[in-house]
Image (spheres, rainbow, N blue to C red):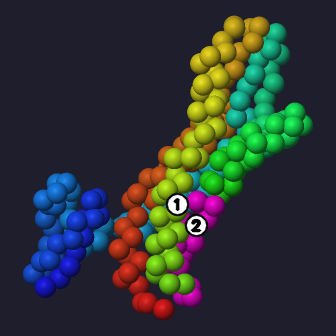
């Protein structure tokens, strides 16, 4: 008998041989491994890494005050909050917009790389890293929420106006693609590899 789990709801089945079937709990298609899971997740992670560059370099927010545009990147926003002695806000923005996304991207990339080269790390540690990535995924969007909230509230035509910049789109796409990369990855592949 062979044990196989549903990737969606994690229900475990005991079957005679590997063949696709539908999960009785959630209706998801259960198969031995998701086809091309590693390749798709790696491609999405590389795409998200490339989107991280314009997200950091281009303006996140464009403030129009009396007809004059002021653009600010994420880093410039953090520096502004530090100058106004708003250390907590600066810290939250730094962690949510700079640290968490880069840690997520490199952690995912490391897991994928460790499946191709010999890395002295236990499979359980790789799974813990993956679970950490999944848990912090939603917190990376805090910058987009702030820009969207401010843009929707503050609209006084040419006197005072706030809009999202180019970086807002890049940043949102990067976070969404990272979430897709993590969700598409079949963690059961980790256990297929040779154990330490």
| Cα separation between marks 1 and 2 | 8 Å
Is-magenta flag for residue 90? no
The residue located at (78%, 29%) in the rendering is 71
Q: Which residues lie in the magenta part?
A: 103-120
Task: Decide if residue 165 is on the left or right side of residue 177.
Answer: right
| Whole-percent x, y for residue 72 in the image | 78, 33
Mark linked to residue 107:
2
- Marker disc for residue 58: none
Q: Which residue is mark 1?
A: 133
User: Position of 77 compared to 40: left or right?
Assistant: right
Q: What x and y, as percent, mark residue 59?
A: 73, 35
The residue sitting at 68% across, 31% down in the picture is 165
126, 110: nearer the viewer: 126
Residue 115 belongs to magenta span:
yes
Q: Nearer the viewer, residue 142 or 107?
A: 142
- From what the image shows, is residue 89 above or below residue 66? below
| Quadrant of the rendering where the N terminus is positioned | bottom left
Q: Is residue 171 above or below residue 20?
A: above
Residue shown at the point (13%, 59%) measured from the top left:
24
Residue 117: x, y in percent?
54, 84
In the image, 187 versus 85, the foreground residue is 85
Q: Secondary structure at mark 2?
A: helix
């Amino acid at each position: 008998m062979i044990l196989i789990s549903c990737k969606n709801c994690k229900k475990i089945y005991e079957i005679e041989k590997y063949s696709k079937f539908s999960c009785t709990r959630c209706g998801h298609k259960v198969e031995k491994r998701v086809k091309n899971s590693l390749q798709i997740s790696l491609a999405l992670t590389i795409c998200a890494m490339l989107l991280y560059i314009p997200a950091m370099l281009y303006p996140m927010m464009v403030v129009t005050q009396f007809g004059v545009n002021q653009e600010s990147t994420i880093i410039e926003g953090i520096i502004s909050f530090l100058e106004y002695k708003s250390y907590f806000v600066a810290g939250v923005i730094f962690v949510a917009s700079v640290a968490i996304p880069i840690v997520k991207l490199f952690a995912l990339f490391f897991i994928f790389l460790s499946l191709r080269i010999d890395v002295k790390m236990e499979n359980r540690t790789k799974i813990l890293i993956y679970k950490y990535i999944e848990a912090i995924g939603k917190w990376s969007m805090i910058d987009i929420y702030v820009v969207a909230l401010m843009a929707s509230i503050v609209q006084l035509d040419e006197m005072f106006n706030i809009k999202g910049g180019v970086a807002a789109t890049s940043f949102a796409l990067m976070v969404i693609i990272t979430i897709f990369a993590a969700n598409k990855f079949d963690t059961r592949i980790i256990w297929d590899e040779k154990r330490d």
